């Protein structure tokens, strides 16, 4: 019985360490992406607020870049993205990212983040109120796709596109 209890405690401890490590890795990716964006020459000097929710952001606009990353044909990548988006879709989730930045109430530039999926993170800059669905109406946004190195957790590549919503 004591052996079983020790094994159970060890398993719980290892699981807690793994979850904590994953959280730290994910947080560092958000932090790296945030720092990259605020230092982007188009954004530098502007005040950017971080949305209080992690939202689903479609990545199909980057299908050409992703097809090169994955060495797939464009058609194959579009099919993969379509099925992947069905798996990745989620309703916005209130989430306090561990990037603690002072909110500037006079700025209406909002930075939205997606969930980290594998080594990919999508971010989008919009003018708005902080409600993603509403902020996209009749707007132009800047969308970033971050590809992270699996071993070093550093940004490996960044792709940037303008998106026109109508």
Image: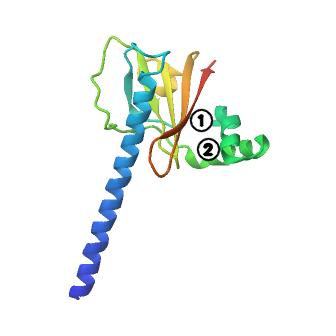
Identify the residue shown where x is 30% and y is 61%. 16
Quick check: 115 above or below 46? below
Q: Residue at x 55, y 27 (%)?
A: 143
Disc 2, disc 1: CB below 8 Å? Answer: yes
Q: Is residue 142 left or right of residue 107?
A: right
- Residue behind mark 1: 58
Query: Which residue position is annotated with label 2?
Result: 85
Please, what secondary structure does the residue beneath circle 2 have?
helix
Front residue (pair 60, 45): 45
Q: Which quadrant would the C terminus be assigned to in this image?
A: top right
Judging from the image, what secondary structure is the residue with disc 1 in? loop
Q: How is the image coloured?
A: rainbow
Neighbor class of circle 1 (other Cα within 10 Å; few <14, some 14-19, many 20+) is: some
The image shows residue 113, relative to residue 115, as above or below, that is above
The image position of residue 59, as x and y in percent, is 61, 36
Q: Which residue is depicted at the point 48% across and 27% down?
A: 132
Relative to 32, 158 lies left or right:
right
Residue 2 image-quadrant placement: bottom left
**Picture residue at 45% right of the left edge, 25% below the top:** 37
Figure quadrant of residue 78: top right
Q: x and y percent of residue 57 in the render?
A: 54, 34
> Residue 46's x, y, as percent?
40, 13
Q: Earlier in the sequence, mark 2 or mark 1?
A: 1
């Amino acid at each position: 019985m004591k052996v079983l209890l020790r094994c159970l405690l060890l398993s719980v401890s290892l699981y807690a360490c793994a979850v904590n490590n994953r959280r730290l890795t994910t947080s560092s990716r958000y932090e790296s992406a945030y720092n990259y964006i605020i230092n982007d020459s188009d954004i530098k000097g502007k005040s950017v607020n971080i949305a209080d929710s992690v939202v689903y952001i479609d990545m199909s606009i980057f299908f050409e870049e992703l097809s090169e990353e994955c060495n797939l044909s464009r058609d194959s990548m579009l099919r993969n993205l379509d099925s992947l988006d069905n798996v990745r879709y989620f309703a916005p989730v209130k989430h306090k990212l561990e990037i603690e930045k002072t909110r500037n109430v006079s700025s209406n530039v909002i930075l939205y983040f997606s969930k980290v999926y594998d080594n990919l993170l999508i971010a989008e800059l919009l003018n708005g109120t902080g409600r993603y669905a509403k902020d996209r109406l009749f707007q132009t946004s800047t969308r970033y796709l971050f590809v992270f190195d699996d071993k070093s957790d550093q940004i490996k590549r960044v792709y940037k596109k303008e998106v026109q919503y109508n």
